Amino acid sequence: MTGSNPSDAEDPSPMGTVAAEITLLICSSCRRPGDGPEVPRPGSRLADTLATDALATDAGAADSGATDEGATDAGVRVAVRRVACLGNCSRGLSAAMYRPGSWTYVFGGLDEAAGPDLLAAARLFAGSTDGFLPFRGRPETLKRGLIARIPPIEMLEDLP
């Protein structure tokens, strides 16, 4: 990245600002071994729980702007989206965490109880000024379950 500050190349967020929206992408097609087609998929259940929990964190806040897909929590809007497949089938239930202008994180080996950890990490990520999800403070399941960290597209424009 260009700019007068030499550290700008390492800071994909515009002028170190904090993003207000995090999107959680939940794989809704993963199936546990032995589950038949009639059994609800774990990712769908996790997405349902996340949407409910994200809205619950905003209960009582006036004019939150929340929808059934997310909520504003301490200035952080968390959107929950289902995706058909994240291509991480060998690592079980997977999710990705996206913030515009920042790195995207892919996690695997999750279970249906990972909702609170994903929401805690979303709040941590939203507070980051350098575009990275801080390792310190990240829930243990997301430290162990990190599959990939993908650079923001804007960073690729400056690569040789």
Image: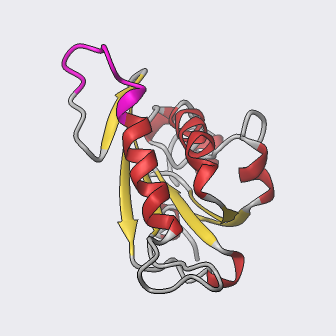
Can you tell which quarter of the image residue 38 is in? Answer: bottom left
Q: Residue at x 56, y 56 (%)?
A: 103
- Picture coordinates of residue 127, whole percent (x, y): 54, 30
Q: Residue at x 44, y 86 (%)?
A: 37
Q: Residue at x 66, y 74 (%)?
A: 92
Q: Main secondary structure of the magenta part?
A: loop
Can you tell which quarter of the image residue 89 is in? Answer: bottom right
In the image, which residues are magenta? 55-64
**Above/below status of 138 relative to 23:** above
**Magenta segment: does it hold 57?**
yes
Toward the viewer: 46 or 131?
A: 46
Q: Residue at x 46, y 59 (%)?
A: 45
The reply to whether residue 98 is in sight is yes
Can you tell which quarter of the image residue 82 is in? Answer: bottom left
Toward the viewer: 15 or 120?
A: 120
The reply to whether residue 100 is in sight is no
- Picture coordinates of residue 125, whole percent (x, y): 57, 39
What's the image's color scheme?
Answer: secondary structure
**Above/below status of 26 relative to 143:** below
